[in-house]
């Protein structure tokens, strides 16, 4: 029996084998011909989003000239030359001349923070931003239309606090990327027992102790990518977890992998599972010891990494070799 407009079905009542259906009229309940009415943007939002029509929200002046998705995702995809497939190159990613335009599906990286680590240069903030902008302009070139970038970054200092993630966002938008969102990586207890709390139990000058980093997510040209026969490898449980904007997993031990600021394999693994299809090509322009490359192997993707320090290239190749043998 189909439901009349404005009716809702009360839960079934069982009596022996007899199941009774009681239909109670309820004006404006949002059901028509047995189907749930779609929602749209309202003054106070809605608790469910199935069939949600957001056109009312995106037509507001807030979104005028604000990076709207205006490009088809069916752009040309070029192949990476075979000699650079599943490799780590010891060179700067400021000029990725080995790669043609539109050949990479995802870039996952954590840039050097310019804070005095062994691999850092001592750059001014303007010089540092220009370095990242140069590299990410190249990333933009080699990404396919609809390709994604995930940038892991932490804010710096206290006197004053440097909101590095906000500078990266501004520069990425200036390059032409569309921002998809940001993920808070809550490192929890693995962030260390820092005592840099400023004035102890005093309002004189207390300081916040960071236990989180950011993963900034962008697209090139289009928010969507056509599957074109490719298939996903993400599980239902992973999808439900990874689409939340707060991720919780421990940091990586610097001593364990031989790098002063490594990110754990879990970070690129989640990005790869969420934003790519099986067999896609993943790039890390600041490869370090190869965590992104290892995650790509484990998920059935191809990779290319760029790293300027031969020591770290060697460590990355050893980690990759161990994965290939398993």
Image (cartoon, rainbow, N blue to C red):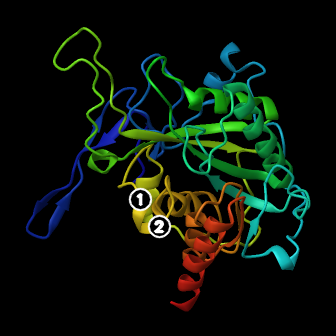
Q: Count neighbours of disc 1 (C-alpha within 10 A) and say few if under 14, some if 14 to 19, many if 20 or more.
A: some
- Left or right: residue 238 versus residue 96 is left
> Which residue is at a point 82% across and 42% down the rendered structure image?
137
Front residue (pair 5, 190)? 190
* SS under mark 2: helix
Furthest residue in direction bottom, as rendered: 325
* SS under mark 1: loop
| Residue 27 in sight | yes
On residue 257, the disc is: 2
- Left or right: residue 255 versus residue 144 is left
Label 2 or label 1, whichever lies nearer to me, is 2
> Which residue is at a point 46% across and 40% down the rendered structure image?
213
> Which residue is at a point 32% across and 40% down the rendered structure image?
8
Query: Which residue in the structure is indicated by mark 1?
Result: 252
243, above or below 130, in the image: below
Q: Quadrant of residue 232?
A: bottom right
């Amino acid at each position: 029996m189909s439901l009349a407009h404005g009716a809702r079905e009360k839960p079934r009542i069982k009596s022996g084998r007899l199941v009774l259906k009681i239909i109670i009229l309820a004006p404006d309940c949002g059901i028509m011909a047995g189907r749930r009415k779609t929602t749209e943007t309202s003054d106070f939002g809605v608790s469910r989003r199935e069939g949600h029509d957001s056109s009312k929200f995106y037509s507001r002046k807030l979104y005028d000239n604000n990076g709207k998705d205006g490009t088809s995702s069916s752009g040309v995809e070029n192949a990476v030359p075979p000699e650079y497939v599943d490799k780590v190159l010891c060179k700067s990613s400021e000029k990725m001349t080995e790669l043609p335009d539109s050949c990479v599906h995802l870039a996952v990286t954590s840039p050097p923070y310019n804070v005095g680590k062994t691999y850092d240069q001592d750059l001014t903030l303007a010089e540092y931003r220009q370095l990242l902008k140069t590299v990410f302009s190249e990333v933009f070139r080699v990404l396919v239309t609809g390709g994604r970038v995930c940038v892991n970054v932490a804010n710096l200092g206290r006197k004053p606090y440097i909101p590095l993630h906000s500078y990266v966002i501004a520069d990425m938008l200036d390059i032409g990327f569309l921002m998809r969102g940001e993920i808070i990586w809550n490192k929890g207890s693995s962030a260390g027992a820092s005592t840099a709390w400023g004035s102890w139990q005093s309002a004189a000058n207390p300081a916040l102790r960071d236990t989180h980093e950011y993963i900034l997510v962008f697209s090139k040209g289009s928010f969507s990518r056509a599957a074109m026969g490719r298939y996903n490898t993400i599980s239902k449980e992973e999808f439900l977890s990874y689409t939340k904007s707060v991720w919780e997993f421990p940091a990586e031990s610097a001593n364990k992998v031989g790098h002063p600021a490594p990110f754990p394999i879990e970070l690129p693994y989640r990005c790869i599972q969420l934003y790519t299809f099986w067999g896609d090509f993943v790039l890390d322009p600041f490869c370090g010891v190869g965590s992104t490359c290892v995650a790509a192997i484990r998920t059935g993707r191809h990779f290319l990494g760029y790293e300027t320090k031969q020591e770290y290239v060697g460590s990355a190749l050893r980690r990759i070799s161990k994965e290939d043998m398993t």
